Image: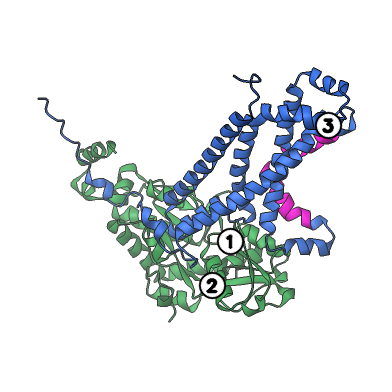
Chain colours: A blue, B green
Amino acid sequence: MPTRPTTRTRPATTSNGVGYHWNWGIFWEMSPEGTGTYLDMIVQGLRMTLITAALAWVIAFIVGSAIGVLRTLPGRMAPLAASAWIELFRNMPLLVQLFLWYFVFPEILPAAWGIWLKQLPAAAFLTAVIGIGFFMSARVAVQVASGIEALPQGQRAAATALGLTPAQTYRYVLLPMAYRIVLPPLTSELLNTVKNTSVALTIGLAELTARARAVQEFSFQVFEAFTAATLAYLVINLLATMAARWLEARVRVPGYGRA
Amino acid sequence: MRLIPLALAALFLALPAKAADLTGTLQKIKETGTITMGVRESSVPFSYLDDQQKPVGYAIDICYQVVDAVKKALSMPDLKVLTVPVLSSNRIPLMANGTIDLECGSTTNNVERQKQVAFTNTHYLTASKFVAKAAAHLTTIDALKGKTVVSTAGSTNIVQLNKANADRNLGITVVAAKDHAEAFLMVETDRAAAFVMDDVILASFIASAKDPAAYAIGDEAFSLAEPYGIMLRRDDAPFKALVDKATADFYTSTAGKANYAKWFQAPIPPKGLNLNTPMSKGLMGAYAHPSDNADPASYDK
């Protein structure tokens, strides 16, 4: 019978004061904000992240689809306008855009409007939803446009030959297939929208990352706080990915696209 | 971790018996020949970068007194001093993993944080107050009723603001800003009527504003003055004893008081601002009888 190797003895020096003091119990302790535990802080942040991401995604999807369609219309003005929108919102860092919306935009309005806007109770939230929504709309627009362009030219020609108006062509022929083609990259954009909400902490939105930072600021338990936030992002995005997979399988046109 | 016994063995063989007796931070300093200070980039006048990007400040000068004491205690006149810039979000990991040995800045010492780190003797006391446009004539907390008030996210100040708002039923819209500079910007651009923060930080923002006369600090404080301390690793009694003694000796000396005057009552680099803040009664007490007590009430005598 082989002898078991002797267990390596751990030196006592690891407890000589050098090191980090883990305390997973921190989440069940009351936070100094007096409104609940540290876990409640994380949950509040999670809720804010979900609401912000959901509304921003609605804006991104609707505006992005419209701009994407404009980009593929015949003629010159519509594609030009769509490209201008895309380049404007895609080429500026999101952080800069949020700062422009939050700090600069109210200053260029007439004074009374600016003051009204600045004193709105949910100013940071509205700025985040619109700012992130517009930023992501540029990315969605590119996806939608490339989905439409990926379709054979014959589809548009066939629709015209059938006597469909351009609106009907998009509604019944082009978009249903284009959305199916770009569903996987659109899923990535949805995940990016969730992650991009963390940038809104710079304009004071109390979302998940901001609340994790607050937890560490009060308790100094930095690793526990950010582990909780990381897990929360991971779970949200895994659920979103699974939902997208399900949708993909559900709407797949038999015999078309990837096997 | 496997390196630790090796390092210990090497140390035991290479150094006289005295060094092998050292533990924790002192052992690390002896082994590496360096002591590392964590410094802040913009915590005026405690710890910030001057126009040559060199860390300077009231807390930095205090830390250099500690360094001198360490040099003496370990008989290491050539001890190398490193400075590492830290943020409030990374100072704990950097201290825990041994990147920094002292955090020389403006960190509030409270009981909650002592579960993670230790603090040496209090070097400053500050109360939460608010700054507003002077033209608004706001002096009391009640005058903020129904207004939008900003504070820095995750600070104890925003907690005190929320509490006062609830206790006094003021209906204040509380807004959180990412950092102090952004919060002050919100008052400057009228996005918020007032900014609640440690009074000394408000004083430094006013002093460096485009038009310092346009701002006024309210008279009423949200809290008792809270202590700032230099942060050390926890459970490291020999190092803490050394730092405590070094800071206590410095505070009770005339050099200690001169250091206060140098940073709070005279023009400071880089722009020659003068904070014009004489020593408070509480801090005079903390200088006469150095203490690492986290309880604000213990300084309010």
Looking at the rendered structure, the kind of residue marked 1 is Thr
Residue, disc 1: B152
Horizontal arrangement in the rendering, residue A48 relative to residue A2 (left or right) = right
Residue, disc 3: A168
User: Do labels 1 and 2 touch, CB within 8 Å?
Assistant: no
Horizontal arrangement in the rendering, residue B254 relative to residue B168 (left or right) = left
Which x, y percent locates residue B107? 47, 61
Looking at the rendered structure, the kind of residue marked 3 is Gln
Q: Residue furthest bottom?
A: B301
Numbered label tally: 3
Magenta highlight on residue B188: no
Q: Please report the residue visible at 64 percent of the width from the left and 22 percent of the height from the top.
A: A254
- Mark 1 or mark 2: name the one nearer the start of the chain: 1
Q: Please report the residue visible at 65 percent of the width from the left and 66 percent of the height from the top.
A: B207
Residue, disc 2: B163
Q: Which residues are magenta?
A: A81-106
Magenta highlight on residue A90: yes
